[in-house]
Image (spheres, rainbow, N blue to C red):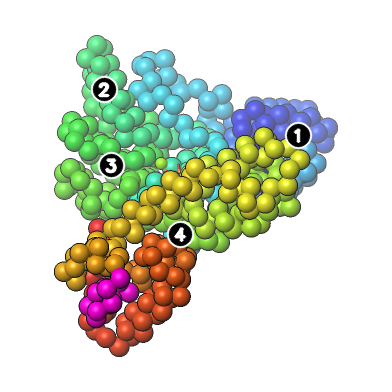
């Protein structure tokens, strides 16, 4: 379900009316439910904040069943209520008037939850660790460091952690910030202490974090690079939060050890907790993500041809953001052609531009592979693409075909077209290499070296 603040308020309002009918004593109702509100929804749990620890306890023990029944009447969904104590149910921080907001828009985005994240082989460990960071913050791993390519769900997981934690601990402060946002906040802070000189509040940003931040989520930490002052400050903030057992979660495009332009001590700190990667989704996960998005758009399974989903998942799954983008294009195309039956051909038409761009990229990759193979065998690329069938040239050609098939996963016919051969020639070339790999150490060495080179 959409867990927006306004729908939560409406649900709770409707529920309270029914609850009031069922709680015989109005004073009991006022005491326990008076200033209650829904603070978050996570999976089947609805978190309701109340104004005292005693109220949370009494309600959990004596009223949870009744409230669950009411919630299921109101929402037509089976939820389990969890009562939590919120010292400040109006959501006002006592000192918010005392100084400016250094980190505006730092609340986690409610649109990204664990609920609408599809777990698969490619993100399983990161997903599980994220759940753990939300449920048992700083208990085991601090920081949690998630890295991987663009569009693979890192930002989504970061927000999900913040949202799940907030739902359970409404009084706690979660700060979601990008590396750039951290830099901007730091600059605001410097300006503030220069103008105000407030000794009591401390003139270190780390004191501000120690006093006010319970969980720190920093997105795309690689962009802190090269700003020495900011790095230094971040280092101190990091240290003070870890010492205070507050969970830190970081994301980046690379493994901490590979972060360029960072001081060694920061890289070491980044890697001292748990470091996990997200990778492009496999076919099954990509399809599942697509179906999830399709239903989020209000479509049902039968509305979209399964062939289309399979095709999109196969073609665009290097990046989930792309995958979503193609779906949006498809919906746009459908809205321009109302009533038309949309099959695979129409779907391809809808994303034609993207397919061409991708093929261009693959063509470049084919070229890259042929060049690398030519290099390895001391040949010219034109010899590999030519017609000469003497031993070494023909061998190199087969290796190139094999690598294109293996690395780019292109259809045989397409590889054939690239070499000016038909697809059966490619099939036999590729299978020669496959056979040789089993028996010939030279071949194994060549393929291993070339694959390593292509990856760099
Ligand atoms: P990153 O931060 O790694 O570049 P994002 O978290 O911004 O990627 O993800 C890009 C888009 O793809 C977002 O809309 C996100 O919701 C979606 N997305 C990525 N992975 C998943 C997943 N496993 N399940 C559902 N949506 C996903
Ligand atoms: Mg991101």
Q: Quadrant of the C terminus?
A: bottom left
In whole angstroms, how far apart are the C-alphas of marks 2 and 4?
A: 38 Å
Q: Which of the marked residues, 1 or 4, is nearer the chain's N terminus? A: 1
Residue under circle 2?
187
What residue sits right under mark 3 in the picture? Answer: 222
Viewer-proximal residue among 335 and 87: 335
Q: Which residue is mark 4?
A: 122
Q: Is mark 4 within 8 Å of ligand 1?
A: yes
Q: Is residue 304 visible to us here?
A: yes
Which structural element holds mark 2? helix
Q: CA distance from mark 1 to mark 4?
A: 40 Å
Residue 308, by quadrant, is: bottom right
Is residue 396 one of those drawn in magenta? yes
| Mark closest to the chain's N terminus, 3 or 2 | 2
With respect to residue 390, does 167 lie above or below?
above
Marks 3 and 2, how far apart in space?
19 Å
Label 1, residues with CA under 10 Å away: few <14, some 14-19, many ≥20:
many
Residue 247 vertical placement versus 450 (above, below): above
User: What residue is shown at x 80% (from left), y 41% (from top)?
Assistant: 73
**In this picture, which residue range is highlighted in magenta?**
387-399
How far is mark 2 from mark 1, CA to CA?
45 Å
Nearer the N terminus, badge 3 or badge 1? Answer: 1
Nearest the eye: 319 or 63? 319
Q: CA distance from mark 3 to mark 1?
A: 46 Å
The quarter of the rendered structure image containing the N terminus is top right
Residues at discs 2 and 4 in contact (Cβ within 8 Å): no
- The residue under the point 78% across, 38% down is 74
Q: Position of residue 112 (x, y in %)?
A: 53, 41
Q: Which residue is mark 1?
A: 15
């Amino acid at each position: 379900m959409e867990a927006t603040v306004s729908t939560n308020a409406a649900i709770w309002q409707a529920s309270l009316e029914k609850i009031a009918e069922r709680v015989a004593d109005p004073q009991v109702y006022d005491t326990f439910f008076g200033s209650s509100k829904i603070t978050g929804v996570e999976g089947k749990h609805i978190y309701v904040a109340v104004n005292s620890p005693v109220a949370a306890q009494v309600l959990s023990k004596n009223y949870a069943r009744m409230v669950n029944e009411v919630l299921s009447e109101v929402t037509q969904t089976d939820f389990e209520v969890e009562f939590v104590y919120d010292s400040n149910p109006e959501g006002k921080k006592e000192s918010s008037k005392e100084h400016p907001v250094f980190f505006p828009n730092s609340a986690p985005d409610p649109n990204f939850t664990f609920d609408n994240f599809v777990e698969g082989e490619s993100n399983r460990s990161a997903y599980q660790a994220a759940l753990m960071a939300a449920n048992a913050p700083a208990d085991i791993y601090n920081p949690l460091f998630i890295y991987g390519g663009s569009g693979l769900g890192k930002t989504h997981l970061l927000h999900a952690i913040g949202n799940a934690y907030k739902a359970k601990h409404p009084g706690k402060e979660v700060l979601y910030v990008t590396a750039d946002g951290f830099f901007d906040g730091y600059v605001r802070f410097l300006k503030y202490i220069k103008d105000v000189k407030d000794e009591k509040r401390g003139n270190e940003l780390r004191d501000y974090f120690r006093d006010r931040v319970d969980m720190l989520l920093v997105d795309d930490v690689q962009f802190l690079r090269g700003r020495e002052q900011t790095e230094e400050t971040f280092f101190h903030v990091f240290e003070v939060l870890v010492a205070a057992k507050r969970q830190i979660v970081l994301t980046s495009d690379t493994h901490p050890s590979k972060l360029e332009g960072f001081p060694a001590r920061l890289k070491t700190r980044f890697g001292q907790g748990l470091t996990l990667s997200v990778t492009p989704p496999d076919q099954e996960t990509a399809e599942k993500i697509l179906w999830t998005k399709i239903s989020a758009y209000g479509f049902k399974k039968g509305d979209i041809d399964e062939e289309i989903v399979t095709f999109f998942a196969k073609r665009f799954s290097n990046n989930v953001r792309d995958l979503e983008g193609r779906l949006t294009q498809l919906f746009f195309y459908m809205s321009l052609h109302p009533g038309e039956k949309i099959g695979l051909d129409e779907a391809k038409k809808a994303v034609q531009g993207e397919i061409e761009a991708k093929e261009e990229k693959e063509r470049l990759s084919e070229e890259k592979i042929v060049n690398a193979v030519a290099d390895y065998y001391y040949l010219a690329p034109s010899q590999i693409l030519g017609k000469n069938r003497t031993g070494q040239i023909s061998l190199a050609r087969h290796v190139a075909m094999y690598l294109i098939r293996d690395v780019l996963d292109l259809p045989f016919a397409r590889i054939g077209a690239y070499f000016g051969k038909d697809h059966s020639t490619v099939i036999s070339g590729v299978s020669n290499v496959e056979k040789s790999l089993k028996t010939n150490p030279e071949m194994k060495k060549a393929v291993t070296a070339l694959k390593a080179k292509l990856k760099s």
